[in-house]
Image: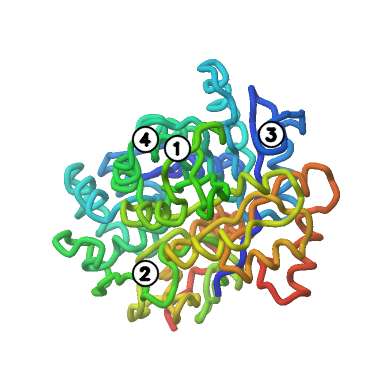
Amino acid sequence: MIQIINTGVANIRSLQAAFDRLGEPWQLTESPSDIETASHVVLPGVGAFAAAVESIDRLGLRETIIERINTPQLATLSICLGMQLLGRSSEECETSVGLGVIPHEIKRFGDNVKVPQLGWNVVQPQTEGPYQTGEAYFANSFRLVEPPEGWGYANSEYGGQFISSIWRGRMLACQFHPELSGEWGQKVLQNWIAGETFANGGQS
Amino acid sequence: MLKSRIIPCLDVNDGRVVKGVKFQNLRDAGDPVELSFHYEDQGADELVLLDVTATRQDRIAMLETVEKVRRKLGIPLTVGGGIGSVEDAGRLLNAGADKVSINSAAVRNPDLIHEMSVRFGAQCTVVAIDAKMTDGMFQVLTRSGTTAETLDAVKWSATAQKLGAGEILLTSFDRDGTRSGYDLPMLNAVTEACSLPVIASGGADSVQHMVEAFEHGAHAVLAASIFHDGNMTVAEVKKQLAAKGIEVRA
């Protein structure tokens, strides 16, 4: 059973529909014990950094989520804002404290491109990883600029390179929306669920 | 680099897809769920469903349509038409929309743009602008083109950006359904006044029209008749665009 963390601020119908199409049962959860023990956990994310941080803290889930992500043999998936939440902070709201799993600040795209980035972009793994190069749907104004040490990663190009995905063991974070990225995105979800192809990913 | 997007648009009335000319004379063009999946299969980058109905009962039917489309659709879905409040937008998002487009309600109450953006994010907040050339300006129309506002579409697009919109869906009333190409001067003016992604809409009949729109600042092109009538598939359109040097998703 896939446990989707119910931060209450994300629109997750598309994600649920994608799991339904794959025949994978899911449920929404706010329970620390589910998040600790489930085979698969998703930290979804559409919406605002501050609201998501506030929701995680209100539910008392901060330490549980950090612990889970720091246990890379467990399958965890962070999507879009969910990936940004891994950072220490975000330019979107500098008073909000991110999960800090990676010591980076999430930064806004520069003025040389239209913001938000809305549309399909090429995602290119730079280390051995959970999926092949493909095109994915993005909807974001902020992004990770440098790859964190000890993680595998993929790049994309939008007014310069940014980090469009990172992974470590069976923990995968995607700035793009696999659930909205057609067949290629379904494959990313499938690979994450199966957990086979990136058992050694990221340890480059 | 970000790809230029091709977006088929389905005008939905009482659970069926319809198509008109200058927003009038609606005729049946198929089942929204079947058509949506068909277009995804052809390589559509995104879909727009516009609710063109007026009655409350039809609006409930629209929520059901969005749910049904979402179950099958693996690409982004924008829904617009008749949205008057943050609550309306929330209902559509819960039904499975990824973005919500507001038009008349945003003109009546510009704060709605801000409220939606704060609640759901800018990437979710699309402002649709219908406009026609009147006395040398692009005049905003609301209520499906029936009400002329004392509002300049170019200035309105910049205001919408300031209020927190994430994308502009720009439809030319003069060109809608006429197959005479997108309104390029309007597209130029709006993409210069506002730095948001702009979806060009109204008038497409050929790949050349789409090339022109991209050359005049469009981030995406919306089309209905060209696809519904089966003249061209999305795949054929994208192949020809690629041959003309426009970067599209494979």
Q: Is mark 2 in CB contact (under 8 Å) with mark 3? A: no
Chain letter of the residue carrying label 3: B
Mark 2 neighbour class, 10 Å CA radius: few under 14, some 14 to 19, many 20 or more: many
- Residue at 70% x, 43% y: name it: B37
Q: Quadrant of the N terminus of chain B?
A: bottom right
Residue A15 visible within the image? no
Q: Quadrant of the C terminus of chain B?
A: bottom right
Residue B233 visible within the image? yes
Within the image, what quadrant is residue B11 found in? top right
Colour scheme used in the picture? Answer: rainbow
Q: Read off the residue under disc 3.
A: B32
Q: Residue reaching furthest bottom?
A: A204
Measure how far apart labels 2 and 1 are at the Cα level: 24 Å
Q: Read off the residue under disc 1.
A: B93
Chain letter of the residue carrying label 4: B
Q: Are marks 3 and 4 on the same chain?
A: yes
Q: Read off the residue under disc 4.
A: B108
Disc 3 residue type (three-letter): Pro
Mark 4 neighbour class, 10 Å CA radius: few under 14, some 14 to 19, many 20 or more: few
Measure how far apart labels 3 and 4 are at the Cα level: 30 Å
Query: Of label 4 and label 1, which has the lower sequence position?
Result: 1
User: Residue A54: horizontal and vertical position, in percent?
Assistant: 19, 48
Q: Secondary structure at mark 3?
A: helix
Q: Read off the residue under disc 2.
A: A143
Measure how far apart labels 1 and 3 are at the Cα level: 18 Å
Disc 4 residue type (three-letter): Arg
Q: Secondary structure at mark 2?
A: strand
Label 4 vs label 2, nearer the camera: 4
Disc 1 residue type (three-letter): Leu
Measure how far apart labels 4 and 2 are at the Cα level: 34 Å
